Amino acid sequence: MMYQKVLAYFSQICAIPHGSFHTQELFLYLTKTLENLGFIVSSDEAYNIYAKKVDSQNTKPVCCLQGHYDMVCVGYAAQNLAIQTYEENIQGVPYLRAKDSSLGADNGIALACMLALGERMSNFEVLITNNEEVGMLGAKNLHILIESDVLLNLDSEDIHEIVLGCAGGVDINATLHLNPCMKTFDEMFVIRSHGFVGGHSGVDIHKNIPNAIVEFAHFLMDKPVQILALRAGEKRNSIPVGVECVVYGDKDLCAYENAHFFITRIESREHLESLGISIQQTHKVYESKEILLPIIALHSGVYEIESSTKSVVDSLNLSCVHLQDGVLTFELFARANDDTKLVRMQRRIHALLGAFGFGVAYSDFYSAWQRSISDDDALLAILLGLYEANGITPHITQIHAGLECGVLGQRLRELQKPNATKILSIGPTIEFPHSTKERLNLESLRAFVAILQGTLQALGARV
């Protein structure tokens, strides 16, 4: 059964660590497995993988299935170890989860579908990009042409959506050099966050999930402390959950502990090192307000909602904050569903943080993917029919997450693909991606596999 094959392949993928920038082992697994399934496989300098399986040399693939093979590692996966999966039933709905870790269904489940389909079907091609989660680096450096005129991206995360557009994004880095001040307290403490759930900074940004960095700034703002070191947040595209801060404070600081922030008194430098915290010169401390006020001044979350669709079109995520040796660094990720809003966000952050003395720089700007498919499109009609046949009434949408579709379309045009490529995005339901709560709805996966197989057959792929 195709569904069971998908789960089996996904289990093999989970056994191979594949966080962004650490994808070499999965690259080898995918290329070897695709070759064993009868695909002709190639790659480019960015380690993007292209594979084609056709009946004869004269056969043109009917569709390109596209996904990425890196994942956001949070929790256990961040240790570059295999992911342990288990099934969980929630109110009668079966889910697949990972033990104390992000699951990597984004986008490992797409890879598993490609491999399972490759066992039984031909006359289609796949494009699997590298390092998507860290700025779509593989897509931006793509040097492989696909042959088919249809690219079906499998990176969406809601079975009830057919996506025809998505947000663009830009990384924002801000740096401030702080001057040390005189230490006025005698007690040293480490403050750690606890209980924050995190989430995807695009698809989850409207859910009012607490940002651990922002909550920490408000928690510490009125406390009598000076800060030695701070590290907070995980990935640019994740709502942060982790905060670890070393401070000098008064003897009663532990009394401020609450459900979200645990405070431990540090008895010695050896104790500090045993906690895994490296401080070069513990006598250098910094005024807490210089660090906390800019965090509080920033609005991390939704900036604009489109009135007719009630969907987010403009947002900012304060992703990471680090203080080490007097250098304070903010990492932010802005998203918008049109490029004008992205440029305005850049100006807004430059003005705000510039007023605090930060130097601000931008990188990895990518444009929003604008819808180009009409309501009466033939491929869209095929998909709608298959969704209905599987008991799902989808809605056509543009999402606030960043998909590779716009970047890939641009790269294919730059590579002078002779025919325009029709691009759509679908996927099973993945809840709480980029967090330790990530879970894959298995009922949606079963329907998705049937829809995917039916789409290839309708387009002319052979069984």
Image (cartoon, helix red, strand yellow):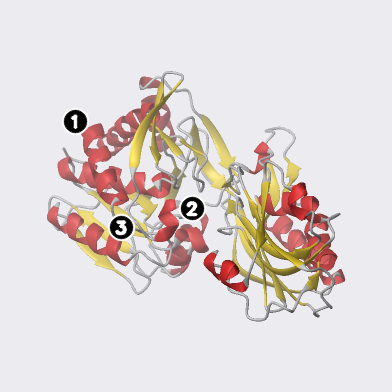
Q: What is the quadrant of residue 110 in the picture?
A: top left
The nearer-to-camera label among 3 and 1 is: 1
**Image point (19%, 52%), residue name:** 53
Residue 432 position (above or below residue 38): above
Q: Secondary structure at mark 3?
A: loop
Secondary structure type for disc 1: loop
Identify the residue at horizontal 83%, vertical 56% (top origin). Answer: 223
Q: Which residue position is annotated with label 1? A: 1
The answer to whether the residues at label 3 and label 1 have Cβ atoms under 8 Å apart is no
Mark 3–mark 1 Cα distance, whole angstroms, equals 29 Å
Kindly identify the amino acid type of the residue bearing the numbered disc 1: Met
Q: As rendered, which of 357 and 44 lies closer to the eye?
A: 357
Q: Nearer the viewer, residue 99 or 144?
A: 99
| CB under 8 Å between discs 3 and 2 | no
Is the C-beta separation of discs 2 and 1 under 8 Å?
A: no
Position in image of residue 19 (x %, y %): 41, 60
- The answer to whether residue 20 shows anywhere in this view is yes
Q: CA distance from mark 3 to mark 2?
A: 36 Å
Quadrant in the rendering for residue 309: top right
Q: Which mark is residue 147?
A: 3
Q: Earlier in the sequence, mark 2 or mark 1?
A: 1
Residue 74 bears which disc, if any?
2
Q: Amino acid at mark 2?
A: Val
